Image: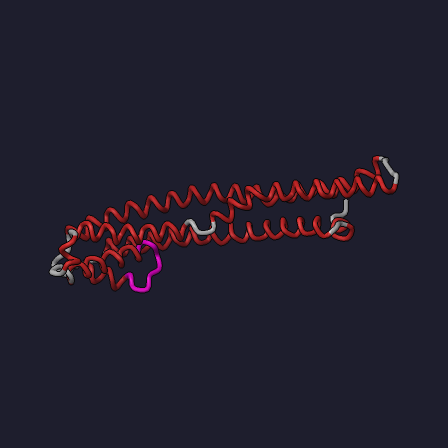
Amino acid sequence: MNLMLTFQQGDAILVSVFLILIAMSVLTWYFIALRGWRAWQVRRDNRAAESSLWAAASWPEVEKNLTDNNAPVARLAQDGLAAVRKYRQHSDSSLGQSCSLDEYLTRALRKRLAQEQQQLEGGMTFLATIGSTAPFIGLFGTVWGIYHALVNIGAQGQASIGAVSGPIGEALVATAAGLAAAIPAVMAYNTFIRLNRVINQDLDHFTHDLHAQLLTSGDDHGIR
């Protein structure tokens, strides 16, 4: 079976189906590599930033150590310190009187935590879409290819196994191509969902610890 015959003899719809499935497969593996690298990088940077934070002797030292640090943990700490400082600066105004430091800090950290979680989930819809649609696209290509193969066989008046097996076999490859694109996408989606859950739990625990530490160890300026 020569797959090039599908591109040479197939019509525009069948060729388009194969090209779409090939593009889906390439994009899936590219995204798997990108997301895998990103997840490993986030976990590594979070561990380093958290160790640097808790090892610091003061909050000014924390800010200095985490300057230009893009780890989610670092951004949570920076936003938490900024929120405490902003609250202290406006403690005599309506902003400071409208809620307590606990509530204001909770809102600031919750907002940053939601943003970090949203970034971790970026692209998951792409994998889910490929995993759910690629088999049906491949099936459509198979049905379309079989239909045209049978039409051509009927027009030529040849009903032998040799005349039928070649064109239909080539059309069935579309189903295999759809599964080849869908299976890695589904497996990667489930893996990254689990990995994101672990990272989100770590961020959630860190946020609670940071919240408690900022409330109990801050002076009037929000730093220790």
Query: In the figure, 209 relative to 62: above or below?
Result: above
> Which quadrant would the C terminus be assigned to in this image?
bottom left
In magenta, the rendered stretch is 66-74
Q: How is the image coloured?
A: secondary structure
The quadrant in which residue 146 appears is: top right
Picture mark count = 0
Q: Position of residue 209 (x, y in %)?
A: 23, 47
On the question of residue 96 being in view, the answer is yes
Point out the image quarter for the N terminus: top right
Name the residue located 24 percent from the left edge and 46 percent from the top edge: 208
Is 98 in front, or is 139? 98
Does 1 sit left or right of 139 as displayed?
A: right
Residue drawn at (70%, 40%) of the image: 143
Point out the residue furthest to the right here: 157
Q: Is residue 69 a member of the stretch shown in magenta?
A: yes
Where residue 81 appears, as percent x and y from the top left, is 22, 58
The front one of 149 and 37 is: 149
Q: Where residue 194 appears, x then y in whole percent? A: 42, 41
- Asked whether 15 falls inside the magenta stretch, the response is no
Name the side, left or right, on which 67 lies relative to 86: right
Q: Main secondary structure of the magenta part?
A: loop
> Image check: 190 left or right of 55?
right
